[in-house]
């Protein structure tokens, strides 16, 4: 997969100069082709990078500095506008390449459908994979208005790929009745409304397992993250999401990759959503990349 530096413009703070020596690779997936309410998340990755300039390189939460993690920001993928199927193929192929090189992938979205090809790529190399999904929405639909490639379907696809018992969703407060019924009947784990406390209870079950972490910024209450395509009232605070990231980092699970999706900067003139997202990315880098 080729990247055009002129397309991305910025890089995440303290990105190293080359990918070959990096332990982790940040990459953008600027796709919002299936947005059902407010588009614009394709501009999220670059705004997160721009906001990272205001971050301190040191995390007092983890007592680590970004200089301790060798990572490279590869920029945004060049995805064919409006072509979801081909875009997903490009993402999967790129992640296949990163995993072959032994890199830790940290993706920036983009709509949540972009996580689906990443799940597929990891499933090829991690047969015992579990997914921690932190989100306002269940994303368990089989289709949305007749379209099976939708931002409403990636977690259902993940359940069908790796088995619902290996999918753990937290913070869910929106979805069709049928989605909640599927979660209850299929054997997947779904924690409604809250994230941190149920996560603490589940992490010991995942000790030693490879885990992929996917975070939709709309798990936050709109008061903390108005800049997203489908905001949902009643969400968690930035402080709780930070604590959840740190709890995962301190646990015995083996985080093999992660993403943060659905930042749509046009709806947040204060940039507080991108600023929060950049801090979450910093903490994931310092906490997940050992």
Image (cartoon, rainbow, N blue to C red):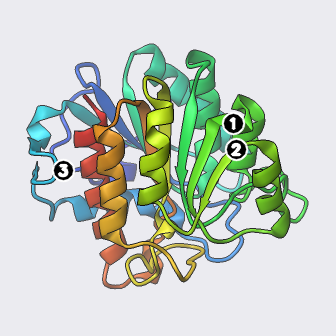
Q: CA distance from mark 3 to mark 2?
A: 37 Å
Q: What residue is shown with label 2?
A: 188
Residue 9 placement, left or right of 255 = left
Residue 61 coordinates in the image, percent (x, y)? 15, 53
Measured as percent of width and height from the top left, residue 175 is found at: 73, 68
Q: Quick check: 121 above or below 169?
A: above
- From the viewer's side, name the closer residue of 78 and 57: 57
Mark carried by residue 23: none
Q: Is residue 211 visible?
A: no
Task: Decide if residue 179 is in sight here.
Answer: yes
Q: Give yes or no for contact between labels 1 and 3 (Cβ–Cβ under 8 Å).
A: no
Q: Quadrant of residue 71?
A: top left
Image-quadrant location for residue 236 = bottom left
Do the residues under discs 1 and 2 have CB atoms within 8 angstroms?
yes
**Quarter of the image containing the C terminus?**
top left
**Rounded to the nearest whole Å, what is the CA distance between mark 1 and mark 2?**
4 Å
Disc 1 vs disc 3: which is toward the camera? Answer: 1
Q: Residues within 10 Å of mark 3 (few under 14, many from 20)?
A: many
Q: Nearer the viewer, residue 63 or 151?
A: 63
């Amino acid at each position: 997969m080729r990247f055009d530096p002129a397309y991305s413009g910025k890089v995440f703070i303290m990105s190293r100069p080359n990918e070959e020596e990096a332990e982790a690779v940040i990459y953008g997936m600027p796709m919002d082709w299936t947005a059902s309410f407010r588009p614009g998340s394709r501009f999220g990755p670059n705004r997160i990078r721009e906001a990272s300039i205001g971050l301190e390189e040191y995390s007092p939460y983890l007592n680590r500095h970004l200089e301790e993690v060798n990572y490279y920001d590869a920029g945004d993928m060049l995805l064919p506008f409006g072509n979801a199927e081909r875009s997903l193929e490009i993402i999967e192929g790129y992640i296949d390449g990163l995993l072959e090189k032994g890199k830790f992938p940290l993706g920036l979205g983009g709509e949540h459908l972009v996580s689906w090809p990443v799940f597929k790529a990891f499933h090829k190399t991690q047969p015992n994979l579990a997914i921690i999904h932190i989100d306002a929405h269940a994303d368990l639909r089989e289709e949305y208005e007749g379209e099976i490639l939708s931002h409403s379907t990636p977690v259902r696809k993940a359940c069908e790929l790796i088995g619902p018992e290996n999918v753990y969703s937290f913070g869910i407060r929106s979805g069709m009745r049928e989605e909640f019924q599927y979660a209850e009947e299929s054997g997947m784990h779904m924690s409604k409304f809250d994230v941190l406390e149920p996560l603490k209870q589940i992490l010991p079950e995942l000790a030693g397992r490879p885990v992929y972490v996917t975070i939709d910024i709309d798990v936050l209450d709109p008061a903390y993250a108005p800049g997203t395509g489908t905001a949902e009232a009643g969400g968690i605070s930035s402080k709780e999401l930070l604590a959840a990231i740190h709890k995962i980092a301190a646990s015995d699970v083996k985080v093999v990759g992660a993403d943060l999706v659905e930042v749509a900067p046009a709806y947040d003139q204060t940039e507080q959503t991108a600023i929060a997202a950049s801090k979450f990315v910093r903490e994931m880098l310092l906490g997940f990349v050992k």
